[in-house]
């Protein structure tokens, strides 16, 4: 077979998603989840990471000096439309918005630097002015050029409890002024870059337009079922999430869960780790490796969600083929993590079978299996981050990585 078919890694990854039994089974149950995740999310990624929409040139697009077949603002506009359609079809892609904006902002920054580099080479008269402007531009763009390997090393040190290096890198947690400067710098990049703003506005207007059309044709029920329902949803039936049992007990103590849920701050606690992971991946990883950032965001969002069913797994499985070549699947840590995940899934299915089919009162056993499944997911995410192959991104970048988080605001 290998003599007649090119069994490249991209082809194998495509087959892995195309013939994956989980999405096939989800579609046979009447859910169009495979289509929902394929059209808006993957097309948006294709328009974002590459000028011509080809996923094969995922990392070489930033290195080419030829004129793009499609300008960055135009790709941002089209990607925003697709992103808005994706949010209308399924609300969860809204978590990708900051990542797309950061990626477009960095692409525009890179394009400006290339243009300035070409103009400086053509003009040898004002060499001193060019040197000073280049220094200023380097200081402004230093946030984009901080090394991804340092960010990943810092995150691995935090998750794996390994001592940090003495190189002075890492996020300046103990320096509030530096954190404030970083925040202001990112606000400037996200909301003062034309391509990122164009992407945001096109997404908002597309989402608003499609929602208005749905309400116009189907009434207020379309707004309630498609959008408002998710903000007040409380699912007390057993699912993969470890929070279902607490919701189940709460619903048994009160007559109406809808009255208690809005006044309870405990239900918002799971949002804290989600926000931290989303912020780190959106600003630290997405500018360099968009697909890997989206995968980590979706994986964390699903793992920490208060409701988790089998169709939620397709949300990040569709992104895995786009970044699987940067993950060390054959490492011992990864194999152990995958084994633990498989054991947790089998344990949960066995416990759920006793509850659903045999009628046993095994609610606590199902809840303990859900906790084990949560631990296995977090452990797998740590293993993925720990085995992330930074060299594949580092070598593909058109600029040289800088000095890291703390060095960027060293002057302060």
Image (spheres, rainbow, N blue to C red):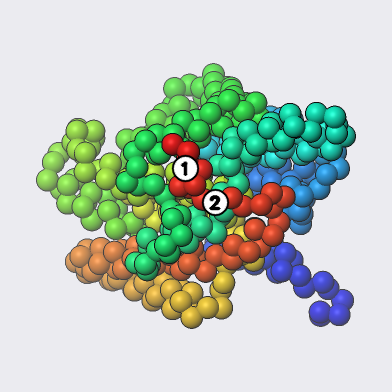
**Residue at left 36%, top 53%?**
304
| Residue 104 in sight | no
User: Residue 139 vs residue 131: left or right?
Assistant: left
Q: In this rendering, which labeled residue sits more in front, label 1 or label 2?
A: 1
**Mark 2 element type:** loop
The picture places residue 288, in percent across and down from the top left corner, at 61, 50
User: Residue 304 vs residue 190: left or right?
Assistant: left
Q: Which residue is mark 1?
A: 410
**Residue at left 76%, top 53%?**
60
Residue at the far top: name it. 216
* Quadrant location, the N terminus: bottom right
Taking 33 as reference, is 128 above or below it? above
Number of numbered callouts drawn? 2
The picture places residue 169, in percent across and down from the top left corner, at 45, 55
Q: Which mark is residue 292?
A: none
Q: Which residue is mark 2?
A: 403
* Towards the viewer: 91 or 118: 118
**Residue at left 77%, top 50%?**
63
Taking 226 as reference, is 24 above or below it? below
* Towards the viewer: 117 or 106: 117
| Label 1 crowd bin: few (<14), some (14–19), many (20+), radius 10 Å | few
Q: Mark 2 and mark 1 in contact (Cβ < 8 Å)?
A: yes
| Residue 20 in sight | yes
* Towards the viewer: 85 or 404: 404
Q: CA distance from mark 1 to mark 2?
A: 10 Å
| Label 2 crowd bin: few (<14), some (14–19), many (20+), radius 10 Å | some
> Closer to the N terminus: mark 1 or mark 2?
2
* Towards the viewer: 329 or 171: 171
């Amino acid at each position: 077979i290998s003599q007649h078919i090119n069994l490249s890694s991209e082809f194998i990854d495509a087959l892995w998603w195309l013939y994956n039994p989980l999405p096939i089974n989800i579609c046979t149950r009447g859910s169009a989840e495979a289509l929902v995740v394929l059209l808006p999310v993957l097309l948006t990624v294709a328009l974002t990471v590459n000028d011509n929409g080809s996923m094969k040139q995922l990392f070489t697009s930033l290195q080419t000096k030829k004129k793009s077949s499609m300008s960055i603002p135009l790709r941002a506009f089209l990607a925003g439309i697709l992103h808005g359609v994706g949010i209308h079809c399924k609300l969860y892609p809204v978590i990708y918005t900051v990542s797309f904006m950061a990626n477009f902002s960095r692409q525009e920054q890179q394009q400006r630097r290339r243009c300035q580099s070409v103009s400086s080479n053509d003009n040898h008269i004002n060499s001193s002015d060019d040197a000073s402007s280049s220094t200023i531009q380097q200081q402004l763009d230093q946030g984009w050029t901080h090394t991804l390997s340092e960010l990943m090393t810092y995150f691995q040190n935090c998750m794996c409890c390994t001592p940090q290096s003495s190189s002075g890198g890492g996020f300046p947690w103990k320096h509030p002024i530096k954190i404030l400067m970083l925040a202001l710098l990112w606000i400037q990049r996200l909301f003062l870059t034309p391509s990122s703003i164009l992407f945001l506005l096109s997404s908002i207007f597309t989402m608003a337009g499609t929602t208005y059309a749905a309400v116009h044709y189907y009434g207020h029920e379309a707004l309630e079922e498609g959008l408002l329902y998710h903000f007040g949803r409380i699912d007390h039936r057993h699912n993969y999430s470890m929070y279902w049992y607490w919701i189940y007990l709460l619903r048994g103590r009160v007559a109406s869960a809808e009255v208690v849920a809005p006044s309870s701050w405990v239900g918002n606690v799971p949002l804290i780790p989600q926000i931290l992971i989303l912020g780190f991946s959106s600003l630290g990883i997405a500018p360099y490796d968009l697909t890997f950032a989206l995968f980590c965001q979706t994986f964390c969002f699903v793992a920490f969600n208060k409701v988790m069913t089998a169709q939620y797994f397709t949300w990040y499985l569709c992104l895995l083929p786009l970044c699987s070549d940067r993950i060390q699947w054959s490492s011992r840590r990864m194999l152990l993590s995958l084994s633990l995940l498989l054991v947790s899934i089998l344990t949960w299915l066995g416990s759920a079978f006793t509850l659903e089919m045999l009628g046993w009162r095994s609610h606590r056993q199902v809840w303990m299996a859900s906790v084990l499944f949560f631990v296995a997911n977090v452990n797998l995410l740590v293993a993925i981050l720990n085995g992330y192959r930074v060299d594949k991104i580092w070598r593909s970048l058109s600029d040289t990585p800088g000095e890291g988080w703390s060095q960027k605001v060293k002057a302060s």
